[in-house]
Amino acid sequence: MSREQKIIRASWWAIGGNTLLAVLKLSIGFVSGSYALIADGIDSSTDIASSLVVLVAAKIISRPPNIKFPYGYSKADTVASKILSFIIFFAGAQLAYSTLRILLSDAVIKTPTPLAIWITVISIIGKLILAILLLRTGRQVESPMLIANARNMRNDIFISLSVLTSLIFTVLLKEPLIDRIIALAISVFIMYSAFRIFMKSNVDLMDGIDDMGVYHRLFEAVHSVEGAHNPHRVRARKIGHHYMINLDIEVQPHLSVQEAHGIAKNVEDSIKSRLKNIYDVMVHVEPLGNREEDEKYGITESDITRQKKQP
């Protein structure tokens, strides 16, 4: 089964599971009078939308490269993560607005019935199964959008646990205000989770690398190749779950083109042996001691050293 097919299969499982849980929580939430359970149901409804976004993105990713997109469509994975963050944040904001309006109104607040407790327990079990499934598949195929969706499911477990706690105290103490306060806290947590997903997707969209270990392994790979000197202007960026590597190396100026090409090819092979999921490696060869003052982009070993010394 291909990477895209695994993402699609996991997304369909998430859609089916969340649809069932959302229907249960929303219907029982309204019947029992629990706004915390309704809030949990709204969160599950956003998970359906999130899984649909992942499903569409998976189909886009499977398209082959073309003239317009010579690097392929793998960045649709990251774009989908960005869309997910907006969907999740909107749901949290809407929930916060609705809860605050109820808390500030003069309406009589009813105590939820014990039925809401049992539905919440079922929700926790269902979300745990879905989170494990998505996270395991996401890590296996290295899909940022699937991992983001899995973490969202994991957050849902904590949300449901807080709902369960609030419902138990609400029913025992006959104080419905607890239920509404928990619903408000859940909405804040949902918005915070969306913000974290948004910031993480920014790194990939702006061709950044949040794992500095990638550069350490790159320099080690070059130094292991005989005849390759002074790796500089090293640039790594992610295209979906793949790395695109560009770098300059220096070789002895008396070497023939064929010999210099052989060293560059060895550098490429060395990098591929130390880093997985390489899309392509482009090695630019220069004569030893060459200096170009107008070089602006890329990372050197001194940059990595300074980064490590920073507090």
Image (cartoon, helix red, strand yellow):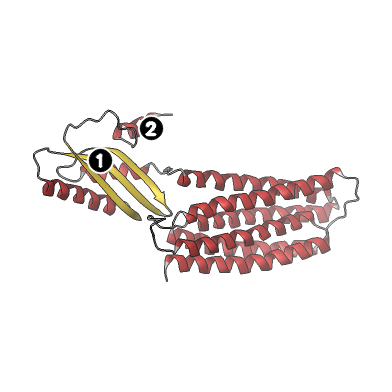
In the foreground, 196 or 81: 81
Quadrant (top left, top right, bottom left, bottom right) of the C terminus: top left
In x, y percent, where is residue 268?
Answer: 24, 50
Tag 1 residue: 248
Furthest residue in direction bottom, as rendered: 1
| Residue at the image position 81 percent from the left and 61 percent from the top | 30
In x, y percent, where is residue 228?
Answer: 18, 42
Indicate which disc, 1 or 2, sits on the residue closer to the N terminus. 1
The answer to whether residue 113 shows anywhere in this view is no
The answer to whether 237 appears left or right of 111 in the picture is left
In x, y percent, where is residue 191?
Answer: 65, 46
Tag 2 residue: 307
Furthest residue in direction front, as rendered: 67
The answer to whether 89 appears left or right of 107 in the picture is left
The answer to whether residue 134 shows anywhere in this view is yes
The quarter holding residue 48 reads bottom right
The answer to whether 50 appears left or right of 229 in the picture is right
| Residue at the image position 37 percent from the left and 29 percent from the top | 309
Question: What's under tag 1, amino acid-wise?
Answer: Asp
| Residue at the image position 73 percent from the left and 50 percent from the top | 95
The quarter holding residue 36 reads bottom right
- Look at the numbered disc 1 and give the secondary structure of its residue: strand
Quadrant (top left, top right, bottom left, bottom right) of the N terminus: bottom left
Question: What's under tag 2, amino acid-wise?
Answer: Gln
In x, y percent, where is residue 230?
Answer: 22, 36
Q: Of discs 1 and 2, which sits in the foreground?
A: 1
- Look at the numbered disc 2 and give the secondary structure of its residue: helix
**Disc assigned to residue 64:** none
> Would you call the spot at circle 2 few (<14 residues within 10 Å), some (14-19), or many (20 or more)?
few
Q: CA distance from mark 1 to mark 2?
A: 21 Å
